[in-house]
Amino acid sequence: SYATGYEAKWDLFLDQMTPLSARVPYMTALGNHEQDWETGSGSRPHALDGADSGGECGLPTRTRFPMPTANKAAGWYQFAHGPVSYVILNSEWNVSAGSPQHSFMRNALAAVDRKVTPWVVV
């Protein structure tokens, strides 16, 4: 929503989305405008540092759009709908070999039964 910490921007975005979201289901993913690390302390699992979220750090997105993820802060998850398996990644988190998100992706793709869901979207 590019709300950058302002609730009124969230309200405007959701009002604009209502005609679509009232008729069509959709899933969301966390990225650089929903989640960033503004402080200089602690672990940084993200690809980029910055203040794109205005300090929201993903909380408003996770609250407004709860997704079926085991790790709410990480935000990656998988689901199937009809003949399609979806693997949702977080563009802010490391996905290089050996990272937790890479392990999730490998396991999610390995678990897909192509006889049940022949299509895969990552």
Image (cartoon, grey):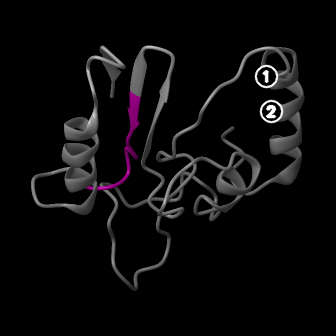
Give me the C-alpha separation between circle 1 and circle 2. 11 Å
Mark 1 lies on residue:
21
Q: Nearer the viewer, mark 1 or mark 2?
A: 1
Residue 4's spot in the image, x, y percent? Answer: 68, 51
**Relative to 26, is 41 on the left or the right?**
left
Q: Name the residue rendered at 53%, 56% in the picture.
A: 35
Find the magenta span and give its range: 86-94
Tag 2: amino acid? Phe
Q: Is residue 80 above or below residue 6?
A: above
Is residue 12 within the magenta segment? no
Quarter of the picture holding the N terminus: top right
Residue 53's spot in the image, x, y percent? Answer: 59, 54
Q: Name the residue rendered at 30%, 14% in the picture.
A: 118
**Relative to 75, is 112 on the left or the right?**
left
Q: Is residue 82 above or below residue 34?
A: above
Q: Is residue 118 above or below residue 50?
A: above
Residue 121's spot in the image, x, y percent? Answer: 35, 22
Is residue 93 within the magenta segment? yes
Q: Secondary structure at mark 2?
A: helix
Q: Is residue 102 above or below residue 14?
A: below
* Marker disc for residue 13: 2
